[in-house]
Image: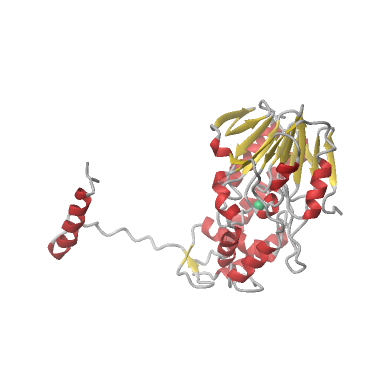
């Protein structure tokens, strides 16, 4: 059984520092795995986890990969279990650069609303220990110290975007250490997410993209998750990738095992979507709580709960899955029924206003022209 801060040695220049699972009841945050790698004289750290204990383990790990005289710290995405110790960059004692994805800046600067929003979507769907604003703040409060920014932090997007071809797969992203480290945009698990490919040993770090067969967060994009996993599978098939690591399983997978793991996730995504159709096939409006219960039972039966399974994440996945198969909430109410939109053809749109509607239209037109918007 892995413990926080345990290290898996991948090769002489690379180690994976293991995090831990979330346990809200015990006040224990989840901590993402961090990757430590060296390319010649450059130390590369991918994600920094959270908690003082993990920080110490990560610092120790940087001394296990040989000598380095400069460093690059790369953040895969803005979730607090990945970014808490980002200011460690300032303590490495060498020239350092630190990059984060621009699209995750809002949640990094102010994480509570991001989590309150995600929990609001499952209020009444699965049991929550407290109303979403309280529960969201409670969850975020577990992640201490939370220092996503250091003195050198910049966004990847400040650098010119590069086309990066690995084998037959074309990505866009940014390269570091003379091309030995490729940061590839994936943006599935959340809007800013990136994955990392190491040229020298063929390691592909998917961070949270393979967290489960269905993305849980409000800003997840299921197609981007599946596209990223598909690209990963191709890299392993073509031997462009040889080693697979991620943010939350405490394992290093190699070669054929990595390929079957990724293909398994893609298969599970399809199976779950089919199960979701089965659960909604009567066509009657369905309460998300009822759907989530059936969805959770399916996940248990199939054994496909993902890397960090708990009722909260399952509820979030269920809500995303309902949207994915085309249902929409009928109102903003708590646990309001979801159904398929009625396929009414649109009424003709009035062109030029007539009658009394001419008066506000004329006022709007005069204002528009006076402000010079019509040029
Ligand atoms: Fe995450």
Position of the C terminus, as image quadrant, is top left
Where residue 347 appears, as percent x and y from the top left, is 27, 60
Residue name at image x 57 percent, y 49 percent = 104
131 or 38, which is in the foreground? Answer: 38
257 or 243, which is in the foreground? Answer: 243
Where residue 42 appears, as percent x and y from the top left, is 74, 31
**Is residue 250 in view from this perspective?**
no
Residue name at image x 53 percent, y 55 percent = 324
Residue reaching furthest to the right: 1
Residue name at image x 75 percent, y 69 percent = 25
**52 with respect to 318 (left or right):** right
Where residue 245 appears, as percent x and y from the top left, is 74, 42
Q: Quadrant of residue 142?
A: bottom right
Q: Is residue 237 above or below residue 342?
A: above
How many numbered circles are shown? Answer: 0
Where residue 328 appears, as percent x and y from the top left, is 47, 63
Q: Quadrant of residue 206?
A: top right
**Is residue 369 in view from this perspective?**
yes
**265 with respect to 164 (left or right):** right
225 or 12, which is in the foreground? Answer: 12
Position of the N terminus, as image quadrant, is bottom right
**35 with respect to 328 (left or right):** right
Q: Is residue 27 above or below residue 362?
A: below
Q: Is residue 129 above or below residue 365?
A: below
């Amino acid at each position: 059984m892995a413990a926080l801060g345990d290290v898996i040695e991948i090769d002489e220049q690379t180690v994976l520092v293991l995090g831990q699972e979330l346990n809200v009841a015990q006040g224990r945050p989840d901590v993402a795995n961090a990757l430590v790698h060296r390319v010649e004289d450059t130390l590369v750290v991918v994600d920094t986890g959270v908690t003082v204990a993990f920080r110490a383990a990560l610092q120790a790990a940087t001394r296990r990969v040989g000598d380095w005289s400069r460093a690059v710290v790369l953040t895969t995405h803005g979730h607090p279990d990945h970014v808490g110790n980002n200011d460690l960059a300032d303590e490495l004692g060498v020239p350092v650069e630190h990059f984060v994805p621009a699209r995750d800046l809002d949640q990094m600067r102010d994480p509570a609303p991001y989590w309150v929003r995600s929990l609001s979507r499952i209020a009444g769907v699965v049991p929550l220990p407290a109303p979403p604003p309280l529960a969201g703040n409670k969850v975020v409060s577990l992640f201490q110290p939370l220092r996503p920014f250091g003195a050198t932090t910049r966004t990847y997007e400040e650098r010119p975007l590069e086309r990066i071809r690995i084998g037959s797969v074309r990505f866009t992203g940014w390269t570091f250490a003379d091309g030995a480290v490729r940061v590839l945009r994936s943006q599935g698990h959340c809007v800013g997410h990136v994955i990392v490919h190491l040229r020298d040993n063929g390691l592909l770090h998917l961070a949270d993209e393979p967290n489960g067969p269905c993305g849980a967060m409000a800003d997840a994009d299921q197609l981007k998750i599946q596209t990223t996993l598909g690209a990963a599978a191709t890299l392993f098939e073509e031997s462009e990738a040889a080693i697979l690591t991620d943010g939350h399983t405490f394992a290093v997978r190699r070669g054929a095992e990595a390929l079957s793991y990724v293909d398994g996730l893609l298969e599970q995504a399809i199976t779950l979507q089919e199960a979701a159709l089965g659960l909604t096939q009567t066509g009657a409006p369905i309460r998300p709580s009822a759907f989530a219960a059936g969805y959770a039972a399916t996940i248990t039966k199939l054994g496909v709960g993902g890397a960090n399974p708990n009722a909260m994440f399952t509820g979030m996945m269920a809500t995303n899955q309902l949207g994915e198969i085309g249902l929409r909430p009928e109102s903003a109410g708590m646990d309001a029924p979801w159904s398929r939109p009625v396929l009414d053809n649109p009424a003709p749109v009035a062109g030029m206003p007539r009658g009394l509607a001419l008066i506000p239209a004329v006022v709007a037109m005069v204002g528009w022209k006076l402000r010079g918007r019509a040029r």
